[in-house]
Image (cartoon, rainbow, N blue to C red):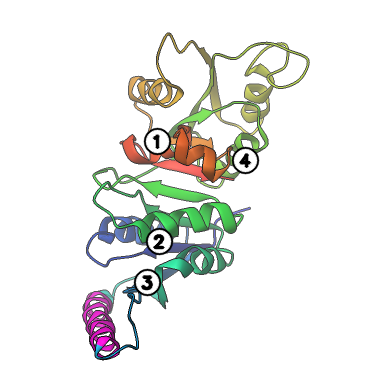
């Protein structure tokens, strides 16, 4: 299947401009339709709303937020006039507690979704937007680091392989993005042979499967040697000069992730290389 419908999710026309520009070039190269989910996050209602003058204060805050974001998005759209490909704007105004559901709903109508990686300075709704797409849409998500300066992805990819359902989904979704002559490294970290899971020869069966699709494949069984799995993957991506890391996103529950940050969350915060995530 070819990519013909792309969505880029934006919580700010300024902070997410690089992701948008990449999405436009990505769509143009594939002759694909590009839509932009442009979020306006409204301020939460505070304690005392409706009591005394609090209602008027909140109404003023609400209108101020709407006016500011409308001006920002209007300015953004004005700059896109006359450029190709044309962009379908989908304005989504909501409170923060609805961001996940609405971002997931929007993403279900696309082949792939492009989002900027959350930064430490971001307010929570941006991370909620990304998690909503990944966890609720059933679509692959291409996540671009905020400071990434590259122009293409999918020529040299590290595929994180742990023999899970999520990893299998991510690997096959990545074939939407990989170039026809891509070099691929299948990376299994601390993999133990067995009748199930990795099998008797970790990485080799999946490596052979990927090679049958025409990609140049190298299987790498990596020892962590005291490093975390994210650090192993990042070290490998650096040594291979990879332009993409592919992995299954959020294998564990959100409660587990919040207590002990997992591979996905760590890579989202630290990777300098774009990520292709599937759940």
The residue to which callout 1 is attached is 267
Residue 32: mark? none
**Alpha carbon separation for disc pair 1 and 2:** 28 Å
Query: What is the x, y in percent for residue 192?
Result: 64, 11
The residue to which callout 4 is attached is 172
Query: What is the x, y in percent for residue 48?
Result: 32, 80
Give the label, 1 or 2, closer to the camera. Answer: 1
* Residue at (32% x, 56% y) in the render: 19
Q: In which quarter of the image is the C terminus?
A: top right
User: Which of disc 4 and disc 2 is earlier in sequence?
Assistant: 2
Please state the extent of the stretch shown in magenta in the rendering. Answer: 54-79
Give the label, 4 or 3, closer to the camera. Answer: 3
**Alpha carbon separation for disc pair 2 and 4:** 23 Å
Q: Which of 225 and 219 is in front in this view?
A: 225
Q: Does residue 257 sit above or below 219 in this rendering?
A: below
Q: Does residue 146 sit above or below 45 in this rendering?
A: above
Tell me the SS state at disc 4. helix
* Residue at (26% x, 77% y) in the render: 69
Label 3 crowd bin: few (<14), some (14–19), many (20+), radius 10 Å? many
Q: Which of 35 and 216 is in front in this view?
A: 35
* Residue 91 is covered by the magenta coloring: no
The residue to which callout 3 is attached is 38
**Alpha carbon separation for disc pair 2 and 3:** 20 Å
The residue to which callout 2 is attached is 28
Q: Do the residues labelled 1 and 2 touch (CB within 8 Å)?
A: no
* Residue at (41% x, 62% y) in the render: 8
Tell me the SS state at disc 1. helix
Q: Is residue 89 visible?
A: no
Q: Does residue 55 sit above or below 202 in this rendering?
A: below
């Amino acid at each position: 299947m070819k990519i013909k419908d792309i969505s880029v999710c934006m919580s700010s026309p300024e902070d997410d401009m690089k992701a948008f520009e990449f999405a436009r070039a990505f769509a143009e190269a594939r002759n694909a339709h590009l839509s932009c989910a442009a979020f306006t996050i409204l301020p939460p209602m505070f304690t005392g709303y409706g009591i005394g003058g609090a209602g008027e204060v909140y109404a003023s805050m609400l209108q101020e937020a709407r006016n500011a974001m409308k001006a920002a998005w209007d300015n953004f759209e004005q700059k896109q006039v006359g450029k190709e490909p044309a962009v379908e704007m989908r304005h989504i105004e909501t409170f923060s507690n609805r961001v996940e559901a609405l971002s997931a709903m929007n993403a279900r109508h696309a082949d792939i979704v492009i989002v900027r990686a959350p930064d430490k300075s971001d307010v929570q709704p941006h991370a909620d937007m990304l998690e909503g797409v990944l966890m609720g849409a059933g679509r692959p998500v291409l996540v671009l680091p905020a400071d990434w300066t590259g122009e293409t992805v999918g020529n040299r990819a590290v595929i994180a392989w742990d023999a899970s359902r999520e990893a299998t989904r991510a690997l096959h979704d990545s074939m939407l993005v990989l170039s026809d002559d891509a070099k691929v490294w299948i990376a299994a970290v601390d993999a133990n042979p067995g009748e199930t899971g990795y099998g008797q020869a970790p990485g080799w069966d999946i490596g052979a499967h990927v090679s049958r699709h025409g990609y140049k494949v190298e299987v790498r069984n990596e020892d962590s040697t005291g490093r975390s799995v994210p650090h192993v993957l990042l070290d490998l991506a650096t040594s291979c000069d990879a332009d993409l890391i592919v992995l299954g996103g959020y294998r564990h529950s959100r409660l587990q992730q919040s207590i002990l940050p997992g591979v996905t969350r760590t890579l989202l915060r630290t990777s300098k290389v774009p990520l292709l995530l599937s759940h």
